[in-house]
Image (cartoon, helix red, strand yellow):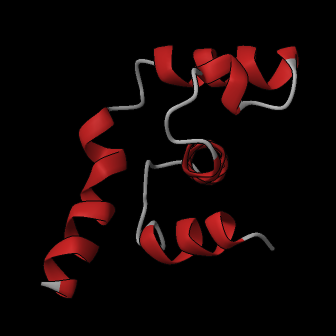
Amino acid sequence: MTESTHWTEVEFAELDLGDARLDSRAKKIMAQFSDRPSASIPKSCNGWGETLATYRFLENDAVEWRDIMEPHWAQTQQRM
């Protein structure tokens, strides 16, 4: 488990997008983004397949960015 994967599991432990597969994908994407925070989506992902999967996830009408960020905001408030 990488440091970013551990951070993601803690930071997004309360993530609930209504589907366990979406939760899992969101956590994987957040871990990839946190590994390379200034990189583009293709450079953050491990190959073209993951890049396409990330774009599909972000375009999913069932996924609202605020729902992804809510656990992160709650963790931030708890730390303050």
Q: In this view, does 69 lie to the left or right of 28?
A: left
Q: Where is residue 44 in the image (x, y as percent from the top left)?
A: 68, 32
Q: In this view, does 44 lie to the left or right of 77?
A: right
From the image, which quarter does the N terminus lie in?
A: bottom right
Residue lying farthest to the front in this orientation = 38
Q: Which residue is drawn at 14% across and 76% down?
A: 77
From the image, which quarter does the C terminus lie in?
A: bottom left
Q: Which residue is drawn at 31% across and 64% down?
A: 71
Q: In this view, does 68 lie to the left or right of 6?
A: left
- Of the pair 12 and 80, the residue shown nearer to us: 80
Looking at the rendering, which quadrant does residue 11 occupy? bottom left
Q: In this view, does 19 lie above or below 10?
A: above
Q: Where is residue 21 in the image (x, y as percent from the top left)?
A: 67, 46
- Of the pair 46 and 14, the residue shown nearer to us: 46
Q: Which residue is drawn at 64% across and 75% down?
A: 6
- Of the pair 25 and 2, the residue shown nearer to us: 2
Tally of numbered tags: 0
Looking at the rendering, which quadrant does residue 14 occupy? bottom left
Q: In this view, does 76 lie above or below 42?
A: below
Q: Where is residue 66 in the image (x, y as percent from the top left)?
A: 24, 41
Q: Residue at x 60, y 15 (%)?
A: 55
